Image: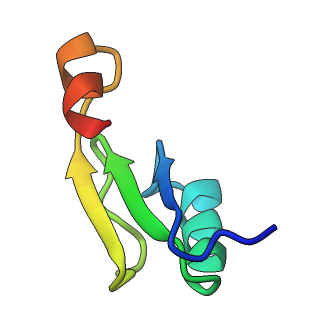
Amino acid sequence: MDVAGKKILIAGGAGFIGTNLAIALSGRGARLRLTTHHKAPQVEIAVAEMVQADLRHPAHCAIVV
């Protein structure tokens, strides 16, 4: 799958799955936005935009997307 230049939102970007997905997609040239809630990111991904949000709230969802 070609994701180079595509915008991809990863909810839970600070978790185990989200972090590893972000690492894999960043290596393929994707433009990433990762959400975090309480947990700090495990690693820093230079090409990823981090947004702290509680996705249980519609207003936070609107900000993220």
Query: What is the basis of the colouring in this image?
Result: rainbow
Quarter where residue 49 is shown: bottom left
What residue do we see at 43% from left, 64% from top? 32
Q: Is residue 63 above or below residue 23?
A: above
In the picture, the quarter occupied by the N terminus is bottom right
In the picture, the quarter occupied by the C terminus is top left
Q: Is residue 65 above or below residue 50?
A: above
Q: Name the residue nearer the viewer: 53 or 5.
A: 5
- The answer to whether residue 63 is left or right of residue 54 is left
Find residue 63 and report its horizontal and vertical position in percent: 19, 33
Q: Is residue 63 above or below residue 18?
A: above
- The answer to whether residue 22 is left or right of residue 24 is left
What residue do we see at 53% from left, 63% from top? 6
What residue do we see at 55% from left, 82% from top? 29
What residue do we see at 51% from left, 54% from top? 15
Find residue 3 and report its horizontal and vertical position in percent: 65, 69
Q: Name the residue nearer the viewer: 33 or 54.
A: 33
Q: Residue furthest right?
A: 1
Q: Is residue 46 above or below residue 42?
A: below
Find residue 24 and report its horizontal and vertical position in percent: 66, 77
Q: Name the residue nearer the viewer: 57 or 15.
A: 57
Find residue 58 and report its horizontal and vertical position in percent: 26, 12
Total number of numbered discs in the rendering:
0
